[in-house]
Image (spheres, rainbow, N blue to C red):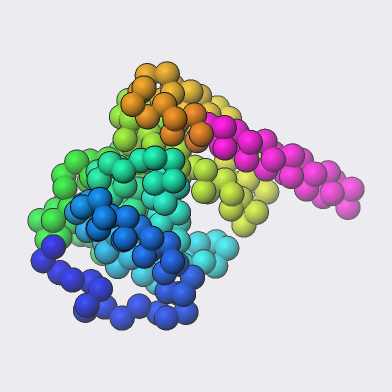
Amino acid sequence: MSKNFEMDHVFNPQDTEKYIDSYMFIKGFAVAKQLNQTLIALALARHFHDGQYRKDGTPYICHPLKVCSTLISYGIDDDIILAAALCHDVLEDCKESLPFGGHELITEYGLDSEVLRIVGLLSKESGLDDDALYLYFDKIKKDPKALLVKLSDRLHNSSTLYAFSLAKMEKYIRETKIFLIPMASYGKRYYPQYTNAFSILKNNITSLNTSMDIMMQKLKEEIDKKK
């Protein structure tokens, strides 16, 4: 990598405290397994998401770190998959820093074109209707590596729905039921090399989505009582 972000960039120490354990876990795993793309992606994600925050106030980098570490915990050690997990939101959320549409991640920083291709598959515009979402998710489910990242992404996002508005929470829960859970079943059926990971992801997403649905219904009931 031609630019060393960890040497030439000063990160907020208060933010760093909130994610450094996960960061160092992934870095140590990648070093031990000789996963060069994961190491590049780790530095890229930290750099490009610096100064960005989630709706719950946590540094944004916590999210891709969680998506990646979840896949590691489910037995995934593929360099391309883990690198894509770390950079899965870079094209979508860091457009101003990537004037060449992410191509500079390859030419300047050494990211593999396959990683960027997967990140491109995962990137989408907001406000898509069901027809557009179907096309978006259909492309992802045909790529097992992209599908693993998307499901891990959905699992973590579903665990933070409490920070969403009620309308967005309802939309997200519905979308998960219609698209994501069936996609996990598809992955389990058609990609036997990742059966265990898809099975765990499906079970955990289903359980979490059910719990969030129950919570949402109770919130709606409380709101109705106050009317």
Q: Position of residue 143 (x, y in %)?
A: 30, 29
Q: Is residue 55 visible?
A: yes
Question: Image quarter for residue 205?
Answer: top right
Write the residue at 39% across / 36% down. Answer: 148
Query: How many circles with numbers are drawn on the protein?
Result: 0
Write the residue at 57% across / 41% down. Answer: 172
Seen from this angle, which residue lies furthest top?
189
Q: Which residues are magenta?
A: 202-227
Q: Position of residue 58 (x, y in %)?
A: 51, 66
Q: Nearer the viewer, residue 28 or 61?
A: 28
Write the residue at 88% across / 52% down. Answer: 226
Seen from this angle, which residue lies furthest front?
32
Image position of 56 (left or right of 78): right
Image position of 82 (left or right of 100): right
Q: Quadrant of the N terminus?
A: bottom left
Write the residue at 37% across / 29% down. Answer: 194
Residue 148 colored magenta?
no
Question: Image quarter for residue 60?
Answer: bottom left
Q: Position of residue 175 (x, y in %)?
A: 55, 34
Magenta stretch: dominant secondary structure: helix
Q: Is residue 96 visible?
A: no
Above/below status of 221 relative to 1? above
Image position of 119 (left or right of 114): right
Q: Position of residue 199 (x, y in %)?
A: 49, 29
Image position of 224 (left or right of 153): right
Above/below status of 56 relative to 68? below
Q: Nearer the viewer, residue 63 or 26?
A: 26
